[in-house]
Image (cartoon, grey):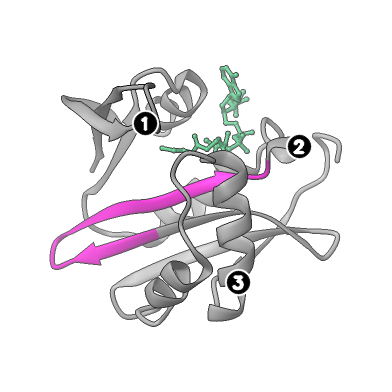
Amino acid sequence: MSNEHVCEIALLKKEHAESMAFIHAACFPYDIWSKETFESFCDELWGNVIGWMAVYENREVGFILARQVIDTAEILSFAALPDFQGKGIGRQLLNQLMDTIEVPLFLEVSVDNKSAIYLYESAGFKIMTTRKNYYNMPGHMGSKDAYLMRCG
Ligand SMILES: CC(C)(COP(=O)(O)OP(=O)(O)OC[C@H]1O[C@@H](n2cnc3c(N)ncnc32)[C@H](O)[C@@H]1OP(=O)(O)O)[C@@H](O)C(=O)NCCC(=O)NCCS
């Protein structure tokens, strides 16, 4: 995929749960979310939960999933397949979400995830605080701090 190619951005459906689990596992091998977990989020789609799938040549390559609770929303999961990262898919998905959500949007991101933090800051997110030991890593890898970020 070259940088000139733009993905189709499709509304998330329950049928996307398997692809979401696959993409999530490719990005977060230490924090696997099952197909059933994504299906349960999809049961709330277009109620509290919203999201989009990026599709490139019929292949599901990235997604964003968010939940709105009353007057705030949070990004639950956001990932693109490693081979498709850095080609504009994440920004397309984030823009779609931000164009839709009308309430303040929050997310957590690992403090060492420089590319994601760059993307969020360039989209208008600000770091609110640091959540110590937010991510528990497997084995002896310890834990990682996360930034809580907010936009709007
Ligand atoms: C975070 C993620 C979803 C972003 O999606 P993406 O398709 O790679 O992002 P984009 O290609 O749209 O890039 C967004 C911006 O980040 C920049 N960027 C990408 N990789 C970068 C890097 N290594 N260093 C600095 N900036 C980087 C791009 O240049 C782009 O900025 P630009 O539009 O001004 O050129 C994706 O990288 C990913 O799945 N990462 C692993 C999972 C993850 O960390 N999810 C987020 C958890 S909070």
Q: Please give the range of residues in magenta.
A: 66-81
Query: Quick check: 7 left or right of 26?
Result: right
Query: Quick check: 147 left or right of 41?
Result: left
What's the residue type where badge 3 is placed? His
Specify which label sits upstream in the sequence, 2 or 1: 2
User: Is residue 30 depicted above or below 78 in this figure?
Assistant: above
Taking the spot 55% from the left edge, 45% from the top edge, the residue there is: 79
Mark 3 highlights which residue?
Answer: 16
Specify which label sits upstream in the sequence, 2 or 3: 3
Q: Is residue 79 magenta?
A: yes
Q: Quadrant of the C terminus?
A: top left
Specify which label sits upstream in the sequence, 1 or 3: 3
| Distance in Å between CA atoms under marks 2 and 3 | 19 Å
Percent of width and height locating residue 43: 39, 82
Seen from the viewer's position, the closer of residues 133 and 96 is 133
Mark 1 highlights which residue?
Answer: 137
Percent of width and height locating residue 7: 74, 54
| Image quarter of residue 66 | bottom left
Mark 2 highlights which residue?
Answer: 83
Taking the spot 28% from the left edge, 73% from the top edge, the residue there is: 48
Q: Main secondary structure of the magenta part?
A: strand
| Image quarter of residue 42 | bottom left
| Distance in Å between CA atoms under marks 2 and 1 | 24 Å
Q: Residues within 10 Å of mark 2 (few under 14, many from 20)?
A: few
* Ligand 1 positioned in quadrant: top right
Q: Quadrant of the N terminus?
A: top right
What's the residue type where badge 1 is placed? Met
